[in-house]
Amino acid sequence: MATSDPGNDGRIRCALCNELSVIRLRDRNRQLCAEHFAADLSERVRETITSHAMIAPGDRIAVAFSGGKDSTALLLLLRDLVTASDDITLVAITVDEGIAGYRSDTIRSAESLAEELGIEQVIVSFSGLFGKDLDAILESQKERACSICGILRRKALLSAAQAAGATKIATGHNLDDEAQSVLMNALRGDLARLVRDSSSRSGDCFIPRIKPLKDISEKEIAVFLMARGRFPELPECPYTRYALRAEIRSRLSSLEYRHPGTMKRLVSGKERLTSVLDGIPLGGAINRCRECGEPCSGTVCQTCQLIASLL
Amino acid sequence: MIVILPDSSSYDICGDRCTVGSILERFGINPLEVIVSVGGNVVPEEWVVGGSDTIRIIRIAHGG
Ligand SMILES: [Zn+2]
Ligand SMILES: [Zn+2]
């Protein structure tokens, strides 16, 4: 009989079989072994993909693959989920931002995993695309590290995905990331960004972005990888400590622990708001960037302004 | 039992058998920010430890 109480040996068994538990699913109060947990997680990702029609036959999916935990889980799960359906191909895109003492290890780990899984991989670097690596770009503006890096990474990913002929871009954003973004945009008073649907169509060179892990918590991703012996024990990016996100991450995680379901409620509230406000411009009139065609409030978008300032 | 924290510092703790969750609480660690392995296997917070167990607490780094 499966039980969630520890036996005499202190060990806890899976609710579905007699194997040892690796995690208790907090929302269902259920203990699961590695195998049943992996199956449960994969099924939830499949549901997310299906319910949002994220993937269609014939898609070529560019997977943003840094080699960190989220993108490693994403690549493993997508590979298993799409191999069943013939017509879909994956290409892993790895962006080398150029962060001394941090990035070379993760790139190596990304290269060996893509090779092991037999997934085509493209590696692009900030220095190749923008003429400078992130360390050089940030020399005098470390406190803006994550926003600058984010803008450039997005651009690098998009151009690599276009060059690879991708029809979708998949990123490893998880439930914690999504909840943090909602809270960050709210705290910044950035209403336009708060309600923007990140997958909404825009620009001429647009490739839809999908987030198959958006309903999976960071802890679940870590346990999933650890139980498969695939948890990349890599250092944290040295720039994250400058970011507002780091503070929000820790506070939100404490709230989630004490008030389970906080993150899900925050994200679903945001999604309801997005659907209600669909099509209503909140940031003034929307123009098109004259360089890249992305929607922006002025004549040249933030990304193109930043790139121009580096060249 | 031996507890190894994310910063690699280790503590030899004697006393009654207790749950992994109570050890995390004792060190002021939010269970959602770490994974815990006992004897190399990842375990839930309800897992009971003691005796000669080695409990390793691994911080989940942001990003990736
Ligand atoms: Zn099981
Ligand atoms: Zn532009």
Image (tube, helix red, strand yellow):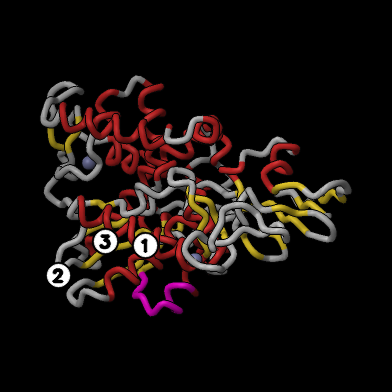
Instruction: Kindly identify the amino acid type of the residue bearing the numbered disc 2.
Output: Gly
The quarter of the picture where the N terminus of chain A appears is bottom right
Instruction: Kindly identify the amino acid type of the residue bearing the numbered disc 1.
Output: Ser
The residues bearing labels 3 and 1 have C-alpha atoms spaced at a distance of 25 Å
Chain letter of disc 2 in the image: A
Task: Tell me if residue A88 is in the magenta stretch.
Answer: no
Are labels 3 and 1 assigned to the same chain?
yes
For residue A42, the mark is 1
Quick one: label 1, few (<14), some, or many (20+) residues within 10 Å? many
Q: Is residue A167 above or below residue B12?
A: below
| Residue visible at 25% across and 64% down in the picture | A61
First in sequence: mark 2 vs mark 3: 2
Quick one: label 2, few (<14), some, or many (20+) residues within 10 Å? few
| Residue visible at 55% across and 68% down in the picture | A18
Chain letter of disc 3 in the image: A
Asked if the residue under mark 3 is in contact with the one under mark 2, i.e. CB atoms within 8 Å, the reply is: no
What residue is shown with label 3?
Answer: A161
- Residue A141 in view here: no
Q: Quadrant of residue A116?
A: bottom left
Instruction: Kindly identify the amino acid type of the residue bearing the numbered disc 3.
Output: Ala
The x, y position of residue A37, in whole percent, is: 46, 61
Q: Which residues are magenta?
A: A113-121
What residue is shown with label 2?
Answer: A58
First in sequence: mark 1 vs mark 2: 1
Is A193 on the left or on the right of A14, as rendered?
Answer: left
The x, y position of residue A194, in whole percent, is: 29, 29
Q: Is residue B52 above or below residue A25?
A: below
The x, y position of residue B51, in whole percent, is: 84, 57
Are labels 1 and 2 assigned to the same chain?
yes
For mark 1, give the secondary structure: helix
